Image: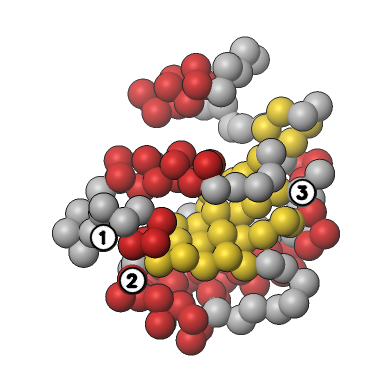
Amino acid sequence: MKITFVLLLSTGKDIELATTILIPSIYHFFKINDIFEIFIIVRDKDYPLLINKINIKDDIKFKIMKDSEFYPNYSSNKINSYYLQMFMKLKISNMIETEFYLTLDADIFFCGKTDINDLIKENKAIYQKYNCNDVWTVRSVKYLEYEN
């Protein structure tokens, strides 16, 4: 079983964090053979910046898309909202070839040896349950039909 990582980048700062911290941490700590691809969506205007900064090695497949290719009716220069980003993270599921994918944020990083077994148990994704449930968590749990 393999997993796809999804990363939406919306600013130059996101690109800097992703290319200097997040992606190198994936290479260093995540079991590369468990990754099907890293799917990145970036603003059209920031695409050249990402291409110049990213260090792509042959052992991970990258799929990089401009947001206008991903969602042609949307202009990231006009709209930038949390809800739109959440919508895009769910909409991308139609383009993912693996059974599971993990959305990443540019400001996170892996800091210990990790593989797919740390993310998926008994063919179910693992998630962190908090004491309080926000609307997003409640809707996601319902949509994913998660019972535990």
In the rendered image, the vertical position of residue 103 relative to residue 66, given as above or below = above
Circle 2 crowding by C-alpha within 10 Å: few under 14, some 14–19, many from 20: some
Residue 63 position, x and y percent, is 58, 65
- Mark 1 and mark 2 residues within 8 Å of each other at the beta carbon: yes
- Element type at mark 1: loop
- Element type at mark 3: loop
All told, the count of numbered labels is 3
Quadrant of the frame with the N terminus = top right
Residue for point 72% across, 56% down: 36
Which residue position holds label 1?
A: 76
Residue for point 80% across, 27% down: 122
Q: Which amino acid does label 2 sit on?
A: Asp
Instruction: Give the quarter of the image for residue 15.
Output: bottom left
Q: Is residue 131 visible?
A: no
Q: Which label's residue is closer to the chain start, 1 or 2?
A: 2
Circle 1 crowding by C-alpha within 10 Å: few under 14, some 14–19, many from 20: some
Q: Residue 44 carries which label?
A: 2
Residue for point 62% across, 67% down: 62
Residue 56 position, x and y percent, is 64, 78
Q: Which label's residue is closer to the chain start, 1 or 3?
A: 3
Q: Which of 21 and 81 is in front in this view?
A: 81
Give the distance between the C-alpha atoms of the residues marked 1 and 3, in whole angstroms: 31 Å
Q: Residue 97 carries which label?
A: none
Q: Residue 2 carries which label?
A: 3
